[in-house]
Image (cartoon, rainbow, N blue to C red):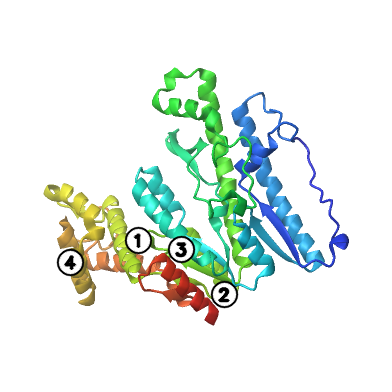
């Protein structure tokens, strides 16, 4: 795969007139498995006979190839005065039919992906499954009423992580894929590679044992095997970065080709979805008005999580100082803060009474001693910690800075706590009035 040149064999003059140009895409791991089969262009091992490095180089090649194909297709569509659509083959066939032949609203679905996956990585399988099932049910209900583009029809940023050289680096093996939109393969344009196990390609399986052995007992591996894993982890970081870069570009392209954006619970369980926020901002910058399912209960939990995490930062930085006898109690207090209704009732009441009252309550509740701040630097961690009023001011500023203020002001927000089916119905009703 040395010097290469990408050439489109298609002439825009031949295609005119055309109404649509469709770029079909698939996960790079599936493409890799297809192209490594006998008679295909990636069959031969070319990187010093090392299958691990060879696979990573080929995946980077596929990423580059796919990006260039997208650019060429967009240029072709512009030359033909046709609409261009990026379409992942793991969408249902019914979505593709709807896109071409039905007069339905075209909607991009934006939702949490990283948070449920983090729960899976932590072993909280039931919690993760509950969130994924809820999101999938909302997508299913919405899909029956609109032409729905779903971000998880491409799911590539799912490497396991290992501690290597004092940092978290991707493990050359894939974690579980997000569930498919439909279970019947006859209702997808996707064709599973021959080398797949079930719905999963084999990428990474052949060296997963070596990677896990590196974690548990590095001495059991030969120097060459250790070198291969460490070299691969370094290269895999570059692959992971490229994948994430394409995710942002691709999701923005999906937003641009959609009439509407529907965001489902971007603060689910109080956890921020940064990708959702960027997609909402992008849609608004194009003149769109997103529809956000954001129950009041999520907003309440969001504020609790923000304050809890920020107070942890203040303690870590030495700006809140626990009394020696209550250091353990403070750690426990911070861990339980999110669900402590009594704390939050008092917090809200103190907030209404002013910053001085709020700051004093926070310090009292957490058992912190706060020496007077120095005149030169009231926020200095040495010698002075933050006085109560400044604690309150900093906490409130953090709460405000992490709000979806601009996004909510420029959006239609559904604040009721609804079932996924009811939420989908409400979204469709709101869209019909925009």
Which quarter of the image is occupied by the C terminus? bottom right
Please name the residue that numbered disc 2 is placed on: 288
Q: Is residue 88 above or below residue 82?
A: above
Q: Residue furthest left?
A: 325
Where's residue 433, x and y in %? 53, 82
Tell me the element at label 3.
helix
Q: Nearer the viewer, mark 2 or mark 4?
A: 2
Which label is found at residue 270?
1
Q: Nearer the viewer, residue 20 or 184?
A: 184
Tell me the element at label 4.
helix
Residue 401 can be seen in this image: yes
Which quarter of the image is occupied by the N terminus? top right
Residue 63 is left or right of residue 420, and the answer is: right
Which label is found at residue 138?
3
Q: Earlier in the sequence, mark 2 or mark 1?
A: 1
Q: Nearer the viewer, mark 3 or mark 4?
A: 3
Where's residue 323, x and y in %? 14, 51
Q: Nearer the viewer, residue 97 or 390?
A: 97
Which label is found at residue 360?
4
């Amino acid at each position: 795969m040395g010097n290469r040149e990408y050439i489109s064999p298609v002439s825009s003059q031949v295609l005119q007139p055309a109404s649509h140009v469709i770029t079909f895409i698939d996960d790079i791991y599936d493409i890799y498995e297809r192209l490594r089969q006998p008679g295909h262009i990636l069959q031969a091992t070319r990187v010093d006979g090392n299958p691990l490095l060879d696979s990573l180089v080929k995946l980077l090649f596929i990423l580059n190839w796919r990006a260039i194909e997208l650019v060429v297709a967009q240029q072709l569509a512009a030359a033909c005065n046709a609409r261009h659509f990026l379409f992942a083959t793991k969408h249902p066939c019914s979505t593709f039919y709807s896109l071409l032949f039905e007069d339905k609203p075209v909607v991009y679905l934006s939702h949490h992906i990283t948070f449920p996956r983090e729960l899976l990585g932590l072993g909280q399988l039931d919690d993760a499954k509950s969130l994924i099932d809820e999101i999938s049910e909302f997508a299913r209900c919405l899909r029956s009423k609109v032409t729905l583009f779903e971000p998880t029809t491409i799911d590539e940023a799912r490497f396991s992580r290992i501690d290597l050289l004092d940092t978290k680096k991707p493990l050359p093996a894939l974690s579980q894929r997000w569930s498919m939109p439909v279970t019947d393969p006859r209702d997808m344009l996707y064709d599973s590679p021959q080398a797949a196990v079930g719905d999963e390609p084999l990428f990474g399986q052949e060296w997963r044992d070596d990677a896990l052995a590196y974690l548990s007992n590095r001495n059991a591996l030969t120097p060459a095997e250790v070198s291969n894993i460490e070299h691969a982890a370094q290269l895999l970081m570059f692959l992971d970065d490229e994948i994430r870069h394409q995710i942002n570009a691709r999701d923005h392209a999906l937003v641009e080709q959609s009439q509407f954006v529907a965001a489902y619970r971007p603060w689910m369980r109080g956890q921020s979805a940064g990708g959702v926020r960027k997609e909402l901002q992008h849609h608004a910058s194009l003149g769109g008005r997103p529809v956000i399912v954001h129950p009041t209960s999520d907003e309440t939990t969001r504020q609790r999580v923000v304050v809890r995490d920020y107070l942890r930062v203040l303690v870590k930085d030495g700006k809140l100082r626990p009394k020696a006898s209550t250091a353990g109690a403070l750690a426990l207090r911070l861990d339980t803060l999110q669900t402590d209704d009594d704390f939050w009732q008092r917090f809200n009441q103190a907030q209404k009474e002013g910053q001085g009252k709020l700051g004093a309550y926070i310090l009292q509740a957490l058992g912190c001693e706060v020496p007077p701040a120095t005149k030169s630097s009231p926020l200095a961690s040495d010698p002075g910690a933050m006085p109560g009023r400044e604690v309150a001011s900093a906490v409130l500023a953090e709460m405000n800075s992490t709000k979806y203020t601009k996004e909510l002001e420029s959006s239609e927000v559904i604040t009721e706590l609804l079932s996924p089916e009811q939420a989908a119905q409400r979204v469709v009703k709101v869209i019909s009035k925009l």
